[in-house]
Amino acid sequence: MPINIMMPALSPTMEEGTLAKWLVKEGDAVSSGDILAEIETDKATMEFEAVDEGVIGKIVVPEGTEGVKVNAVIAVLLEDGESADDIGDTPAPVAASTAVEEKPAPVAAAPAPAAPKAASGDRVFASPLARRIAAEKGIDLATVKGSGPHGRIVKADVEGATSAPKAVPAPSVAPVMAQSADSDTVKAMYAGREYEEVTLDGMRKIIAARLTEAKQTVPHFYLRRDILLDELLAFRATLNKQLEGKGVKLSVNDFIIKASALALQDVPDCNAVWAGDRILKLKPSDVAVAVAIEGGLFTPVLKDAETKTLSTLSAEMKDLAARARDRKLMPEEYQGGSFAISNLGMMGIDNFDAVINPPQASILAVGAGVKKPVVNSEGQLDVATVMSVTLSVDHRVIDGALGATFLAAIKGYLENPVTMLV
């Protein structure tokens, strides 16, 4: 029986994609691991690999087709002994609707590429043939470890597996999404006024859905502190002078990343994520940093940041930011982390409140360093460079006193930067 090749979910947030380019044609023989096509997701252009071997019998979705739903049939694969005559009616390619129902991203126990299966209710990544064999043998795919590309379950994984009772997913409550006026209603309000209509791309839809979900379902509270930067600025200038000619120039943001990573180790209860019915406490400090790109943003994750030197963090951040702007990041490079940093100080913003990116439990909004009058330790009026920061916190994971301790630890490292090197 021919195998339907489905539009893959190449990231946990992907609901639709663009079939940018076919790298095979009808009649081509393919093996597991061969590159079939290039798929544009909401985040990047990625290669789609074959998980079964056979011959491409029919291409259902032409290259260049936009808005193809995940799990829509895009091609048909013929196995040994099959011909094009064995192909029945294939479903027409289904384009995703303009309304996006966003699902929370699955949470991994440790930073890693997207797992083939996740918590109850999430998608299991398996080839159609593997699914058919599993159904025939009564095998629960959630119990099978995938050996295919990106952990996908393939034929060989289920052939040797034994049947087991299928797990019953725990009940879950879907987030209530805000109802807003449709486009026709809004456009009617501006009849007679000149405007340009901008169609939302996949990234903008995902950002809109996830931010709405975050503000509706995550109980935010906010902690604010002023940080004196003069000692850090002097320390940074000294280090950069010593690093001249070595291709490294440390930024204030590099110090903020390092300070946050160390503070997560000092206050380990804040190094945690919300996992629906439990909290996952991470061991390493995996720090996400918001990077603005055209039409949206990425939050690449600096893994094990507490163990890395400032120069290593600086080089890694520059590389991640450059590839984020080119949309060349792999999903495992922008998923995970328990904490994030959003720095708008370089754009002249004094202070702001950032929205938490679930399942992370907190995000630090960083403003500009500004010269301000302060009262020094001797009780005298002085002038200092002051940076305002706001910690947005998920109250389900972190209580007020704990969040205050965490923010104080960040402030301590930034105001005494030499302690980051000890």
Image: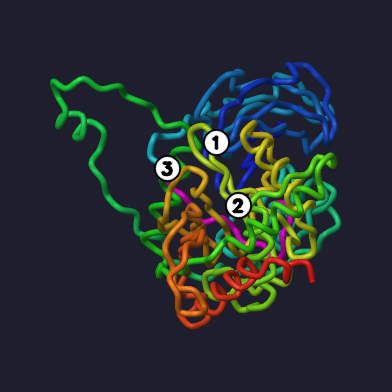
Looking at the image, how many numbered discs can be counted on the residues?
3
- Residue at (72% x, 64% y) in the render: 110
> Looking at the magenta stretch, what is its main secondary structure?
loop
Up-down relation of residue 168 to residue 123 (above or below): below
N-term-proximal mark, 3 vs 2: 3
Q: Is residue 73 left or right of residue 82?
A: left
Residue at mark 3: 100
The magenta-colored residue range is 101-113
Residue 75 included in the magenta stretch of the image? no
Up-down relation of residue 305 to residue 148 (above or below): below
Q: Secondary structure at mark 2?
A: strand
Residue at mark 1: 293
- How many C-alpha atoms fall within 10 Å of the one at disc 2: few (<14), some, or many (≥20)? many
Up-down relation of residue 362 to residue 64 (above or below): below
Say which of 323 and 42 sits in front.
Answer: 323
Residue at mark 2: 289
Q: Secondary structure at mark 3?
A: loop
